[in-house]
Image (tube, rainbow, N blue to C red):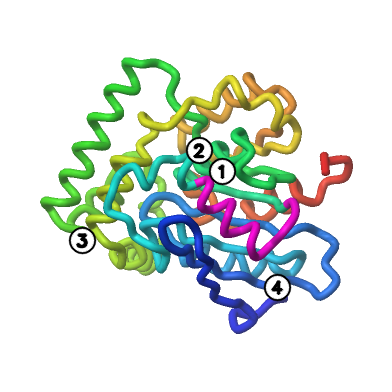
């Protein structure tokens, strides 16, 4: 199994700045393609805990700090965070360190970046796993409502400050199931979120709002069996979105981890590992 010391920290130039990546080499003769992990809003390469190291027992694993997060560049303009712009930056960075098709997993906002890049051809994607994510919003009225919500969140972040905003964020109903986690785990997650730059995150909330991104609902079909839709059974909102995705993309695979909420990788890491490995390693999957 890969050790933490085996990982390599990389800074890769992209348009507008540079992205920070951490790569685990995997076995010397691994036949499997690399796996790239994209975190959610206020996440970083640290958000995955020891899962990248464990996945590196089978293959090379690359974890990305999205723009505005972790050690990647931190633009202040909302347009720098449009979902297609983020997908282009990630695709460019990963192609420089891992030429050729790779497997991708994106969580929440990272999943939206992944679906955008896969549908728009900005990522060289063999297999795709969307964890607790959405292809966008189709209804114009719902778009307007969400745009107002994200604008208000950005305003609160700028006025309250990062630490107070993190407390509000972690108290959202979306993350209610995480209250079952150990206090030290919750404190660790709070610290991980609190190292970011408030101005960059506010710009990200405005520019990467799901209300601003294109809707990919009618473009999911070509992903077919390459796509796994992964959600937690304690996250009814995204469980419903996941069910709707496989209606639009009937060949996609669906997996629900019953005793997990929005962050399946955090709340049920063993079940997450099994589901991810099963999708990536199954025979007969498209190359």
- Element marked by disc 2: loop
Pinpoint residue 122: horizontal percent, then vertical percent.
Answer: 60, 43
Residue 42 is drawn in which quadrant? bottom left
Callout 1 crowding tier (Cα within 10 Å): few <14, some 14–19, many ≥20: many
Q: Tell me, for residue 163, which label it has, or none.
A: 3
Residue under the point 61% across and 70% down: 23
- Element marked by disc 4: loop
Choose between 46 and 62: the one closer to the eye. Answer: 62
* Cα gap from disc 4 to disc 3, whole angstroms: 35 Å
Vertical arrangement, residue 116 with respect to residue 71, above or below: above
Earlier-in-chain disc, 2 versus 4:
4
Residue identified by numbered label 2: 133
First to last magenta residue range? 87-101
* Cα gap from disc 1 to disc 4, whole angstroms: 22 Å
Earlier-in-chain disc, 1 versus 4:
4
Q: Is residue 262 magenta?
A: no
Would you say the residues marked 2 and 1 are in contact, meaning their CB atoms lie under 8 Å apart?
yes
Can residue 227 be seen at all in this image of the molecule?
yes
Choose between 73 and 265: the one closer to the eye. Answer: 73
Earlier-in-chain disc, 2 versus 1:
1
Vertical arrangement, residue 287 with respect to residue 19, above or below: above
């Amino acid at each position: 199994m890969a050790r933490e010391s085996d990982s390599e920290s990389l800074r890769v130039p992209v348009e507008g700045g540079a992205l920070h990546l951490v790569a685990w080499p995997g076995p010397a003769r691994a036949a499997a393609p690399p796996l790239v992990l994209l975190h959610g809003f206020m996440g970083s390469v640290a958000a995955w805990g020891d899962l990248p190291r464990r996945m590196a027992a089978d293959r090379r694993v690359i974890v990305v700090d999205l723009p505005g997060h972790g050690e990647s560049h931190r633009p202040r303009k909302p347009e720098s965070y449009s979902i297609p712009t983020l997908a282009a930056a990630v695709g460019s960075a990963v192609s420089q360190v891992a030429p050729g098709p790779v497997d991708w997993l994106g969580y929440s906002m990272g999943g939206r970046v992944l679906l955008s890049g896969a549908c728009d051809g900005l990522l060289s994607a063999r297999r795709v796993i969307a964890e607790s994510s959405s292809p966008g919003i189709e209804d114009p009225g719902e778009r307007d409502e969400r745009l107002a919500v994200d604008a208000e969140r950005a305003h609160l972040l700028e006025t309250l400050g990062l630490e107070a905003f993190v407390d509000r964020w972690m108290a959202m109903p979306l993350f209610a199931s995480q209250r079952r986690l150990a206090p030290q785990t919750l404190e660790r997650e709070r610290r991980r979120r609190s190292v970011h730059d408030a101005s960059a995150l506010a710009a990200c909330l405005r520019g990467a709002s799901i209300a601003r991104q294109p809707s990919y609902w009618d473009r999911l079909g070509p992903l077919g069996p390459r796509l796994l839709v992964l959600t937690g059974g304690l996250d009814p909102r995204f469980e419903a979105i996941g069910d709707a995705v496989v209606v639009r993309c009937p060949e996609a695979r669906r997996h629900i981890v019953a005793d997990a909420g929005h962050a399946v990788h955090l709340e049920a890491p063993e079940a997450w590992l099994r589901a991810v490995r099963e999708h990536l390693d199954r025979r007969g999957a498209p190359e």
